[in-house]
Every structure is written in structure tokens, then in C-alpha cells.
Amino acid sequence: MNAIFKECVKQQARMCIPALQWGEVAGELRRRLGAIEGRRVLESLMPFELDVVSASAERAEHAAALRVDRKIPYADAFGLDLAMDSPEHILVTADYDFKAVADLARIEFLPLK
């Protein structure tokens, strides 16, 4: 992730995240760190020009189809849908459950802890 953040700072890459997954991140940070510290961490990501992509009706329908057809969690389907938008998009994840859908998009798997 450090390499990705460095590329974003140099404006050689951009990061985006579906609003549903941004909400999951926000909730997990709040649970682990509390409301104030969790908010501070979220705000620290803003210099990287992180794009939070809204869930349009079209995206929601496509995510629902991915959930049903490929048996992945609905929120994960939004990330996959976003990665499928362009061959330049890369879904970066530590969730190895995405291996089952690696044929649909470019996915880079982070090492497990």
C-alpha cells in the first residue's frame, strides 16, 4: 500500500473506492479506534485525492448480478464492479476471496498479515 500511496502523491496513480466500501472502512476504523481517531485517519487519506464513487442504480444492479452469479458479498461486488470499469483499474485487496472472481478484473493481492 505504501507504494500505491507514493504513486498517488507523485500523481502517477489515482485511488478510488466504492461508497459502500468506504463506509465499511469508516465503520471499522470507528470500531477499532473510536469516533475521533477513526475520523482523523479517514481525513488523513484526503491528500491522496481518493475518489469515493457513488452507488448509482446501474452500479447497484451490476453489483447485485455479481453477488448472485459469482456468490460474493454485495459490498465486495461494488469493488469488483469498479475494477471492471476499465482495463487500467486494479482492485487491490488482502481479501483472498476475490481469487474466485480474478477472471473478471485485474486484481492485486496484498500479502496476508
Image: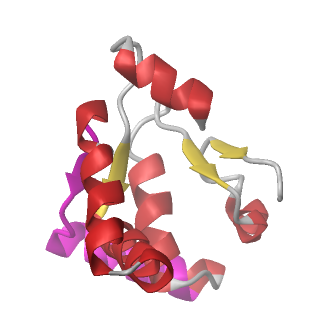
Residue found 62% across the figure and 41% down from its top: 106
Q: Is residue 17 visible?
A: yes
Q: How far from the left and from the top, in percent, is residue 102?
A: 71, 54
Looking at the rendering, the stretch of residues picked out in magenta corresponds to 49-68
Pick whichever, 29 or 66, lies toward us. 29
Split into 4 quadrants, where in the image is the C terminus? bottom right
Q: How far from the left and from the top, in percent, is residue 70?
A: 63, 78
Colour scheme in the image? secondary structure
**Labels in figure, total:** 0
From the viewer's perspective, tell me whether residue 29 is left or right of residue 18.
right
Residue found 60% across the figure and 25% down from its top: 3
Q: How far from the left and from the top, in percent, is residue 12?
A: 40, 13
From the viewer's perspective, tell me whether residue 103 is left or right of residue 104.
right
Assess whether residue 62 is covered by the magenta stretch.
yes
Q: Does residue 42 lie above or below 92 as drawn? A: below
Assess whether residue 17 is covered by the magenta stretch.
no
Q: How far from the left and from the top, in percent, is residue 37?
A: 34, 67
